[in-house]
Amino acid sequence: MSSIVRDGAARVLLPAVISGMLFFLPSAACAAQVQPADQLAWWVWMLLLFVFTFLLGIIAVVAGVGGGVLFVPIVSSFFPFHIDFVRGAGLLVALSGALSAGSPLLKKGLANLKLALSMALIGSISSIAGAMVGLAMPERIVQLLLGLTIMFISFVMYRAKNSAYPQIDKPDTLSKMLRIYGVYYDEHLKKDVDWQIHRTPVGLFLFIGIGFMAGMFGLGAGFANVPVFNLVLGAPLRVSVATSVFVLSINDTAAAWVYLHKGAVLPLIAVPSIAGMMLGTKIGARLLTKVHTSVVRRVVIALLAVAGLRALLKGFGI
Amino acid sequence: MKEAVHADKVQLDYAAVLGVTSTVGMVLIAAGYIAYLCGLLPSAVSAEEVARNWHLKASEFHKVVHFPSGWEWTGFLGLGDILSYASINYLALVTVICLAWIIPSFVREKDRIYTVMTILQVFVLVFAAAGVVGGGH
């Protein structure tokens, strides 16, 4: 009985306390508008950024989300960097994570090359368009839209009920033509699982929007890729997660080049972010079996909701 | 049941080249940043100057701080911060290299659909990398 009460308290109180602290923390970015550089030495900011992204990396893995989606709203809220540089770094954080995870996922047959290539072509084009639009917009509009998007993502994460092994009775014509089907070894079931997909045209349409959003806000967009692969197209959850990583590496590459050409990537900010996130995700992967993942996931959803609200308020100039 | 490999040959080709190129990218990024921050090489722009202006919009930042963007770094090799920037450029090229690598594999398998799709994908990424869209600031 007491453990039930303790669990219940952890599920409700922990996310509430952490998100409350996040909401009321002072924003360095706001202070930076007045006094850009003199408050803290640059190397202190770099150290803080490294430690912060390291912690983000740990909770991102445990909560089952990509680091990019947490990075942009939270770093743009608490660090003195312009959101252009945060988005540029966010894309590179997501890209480096996807590149380092991609090879083993492809080798195991969890990520599917044909499924990814079919969706990424259209997604990468819209990702370039999103990056161009995002960098041309005034900061307040970007903050406003980012706030709305992040709050929507937290809602989707809260409501989404993924399906581990969707049953597809009849694949659609386009997926048959593109030969998008496969088989993978499921470590949980200890057997091979055959899969196929349906509603391919709907998936292609949705990837236009996902790519645009990823490019515009510098987000990894795994949070959107996975539900589309899993719930719309009907790919098994493991295949959806792994293929999402692969699609992300293509879409984010396209958008990253726009940010690089627009001068929105600073090595001083991007590299500690990448290093912190990579180390954090490695530690997070080791902790995965030892921590209460559902509580961490609730914390992340609460963090996202609060970070989204802060971005929204900044967008309104509050 | 023993785990079998279910990835086809093209996918395994992609995985192999991705494994090598992404590892090289991470090493380059770490080496470039260490060279930059430890002052092993002179810098185009000091970290202090970057920090004084990092609150500015990217387009405003580059009016004040003369740090290269896109491929401009190729004219400033030998500087620590440029080396770090070049390593980030390399990371953004990894996917292009991997996709270009598997085109001959698709051709050998006479897979016309995916040959064309991969060529188009490489074209889109090269288009972005060349700065044809979004170039300049």
Image: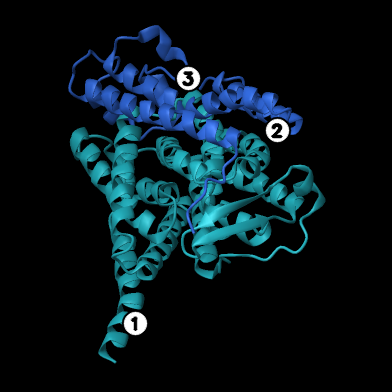
What label sits on residue B114 in the rendered view? 2
Which residue lies at the image location 29% right of the left edge and 13% below the top edge? B79
Q: Residues within 10 Å of mark 3 (few under 14, many from 20)?
A: many
Residue under label 1: A8
Q: Are marks 2 and 3 on the same chain?
A: yes
1 and 2 marks in contact (CB < 8 Å): no
What chain is the cyan one? Answer: A
**Quarter that holds the N terminus of chain A:** bottom left
Q: Nearer the viewer, residue A133 or A237?
A: A237
- The tag earlier along the polypeptide, 2 or 3, is 3
Q: Report the coloring of the rendering.
A: by chain
**Quarter that holds the C terminus of chain A:** bottom left
Q: Nearer the viewer, residue A91 or A166?
A: A166
Q: Is residue B2 left or right of residue B132?
A: left
Measured Cα–Cα span from mark 2 to mark 3: 30 Å
Q: Identify residue type, mark 1.
A: Gly
Q: Identify residue type, mark 3.
A: Gly
What label sits on residue B70 in the rendered view? 3
Which residue lies at the image location 33% right of the left edge and 49% below the top edge? A281
Q: Is residue A98 visible?
A: no
The spot of residue A294 in percent (x, y) is 39, 70
- Please tell me whether mark 2 sits on a helix, a strand or a loop: helix
The spot of residue A82 in percent (x, y) is 39, 38
Measured Cα–Cα span from mark 1 to mark 3: 51 Å
Which residue lies at the image location 47% right of the left edge and 19% below the top edge? B70
The spot of residue A108 in percent (x, y) is 49, 46
Quarter of the rendering containing residue A96: top left
What label sits on residue B98 in the rendered view? none
> The residue marked by circle 3 belongs to what chain?
B
